[in-house]
Amino acid sequence: MSAIRVGLGWDIHRLVEGRRFLLAGICLPNDKGEFGHSDGDVLAHAITDALLGAAALGDIGGFFPPSDPKWKDADSMDLLKAAYARVKEAGWKASNLDCVLVCEKPKVLPYRDAIRASIAEALGISTEDVFVKGKTNEKIGPVGEGLAVEATVVCLIERI
C-alpha cells in the first residue's frame, strides 16, 4: 500500500439570486450565490471529493446525498470536517491542497487569505499547505456568462 496518494475534486454550481456566495465558508459579496441542496459551497464540495477520493472512501454524494432532507441547507464546511474525520480514521492526513476557482465575479484575490485560512483550520493544517487561485472563464460558457461557479482541487494525502 502506498504512503502517499493524490485526489482530484471538481464541482460546479449554478448561481441564483437570493443565495450567499460561499467559498470554503467565507461569504463573498455578490448579487448571486450558489444553488445547492446544502449551502452550495462549491469549493468545500470539491475539497471534500478530493480528500475522499484520495483515500478511496467514496464521494460527497455518497456520504451526504442530496436526496436526504437531513442535508438540506447544511453547512458544507461541517460536511468537509466530517468527511475529513473519516479520511483520518482510515489512516490518512492531508499534506497539501491546490484549489482553482473559476467565476467571472466576484474577484477571489481579495479573499484568498481568508479562504486559505478557513480551509487550513477545517483540516488542522498550515495555511502554507493550502493554495487558492481565482480564474475567469473569459466570458465562455455558463461560468463565463456568470451563470455558474466551478472549483477544481488537487490534494496530496499521506499515511499517518
Image: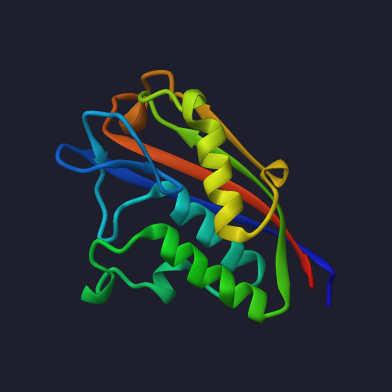
Please provide percent x and percent y for residue 127.
Answer: 66, 44
Query: For this rendering, which residue is in front, 38 or 135?
Result: 38
Image: 18 above or below 139: below
Quadrant where the C terminus sits is bottom right
**Image point (73%, 78%), residue name:** 91
Q: Nearer the viewer, residue 99 or 89?
A: 89
User: Quarter of the image containing the N terminus?
Assistant: bottom right
Which is more toward the observer, 134 or 116?
116
- Here the colouring is rainbow
Residue 76 picture location, percent across and down: 39, 59
Q: Is residue 7 left or right of residue 136?
A: right
Q: Quadrant of residue 158?
A: bottom right
Asked if residue 28 lies left or right of residue 109, the reply is: left
In the displayed structure, 123 sits above or below 89; it is above
> Which residue is rendered at x = 57% and y = 44% of the image?
117
Residue that protrudes farthest toward the left in the picture: 18
Residue depicted at x 47% and y 43%: 151
In which quadrant of the rendered view does residue 102 lie? Answer: top left
Instruction: Identify whether 64 is placed above or below 117.
Output: below
Residue 15: where, in percent of width, then height? 25, 38
Above or below, 2 against 15 in this view is below
Residue closer to the observer: 131 or 36? 131
- Spot occupied by residue 123 in the image (x, y as percentages of width and height): 60, 59
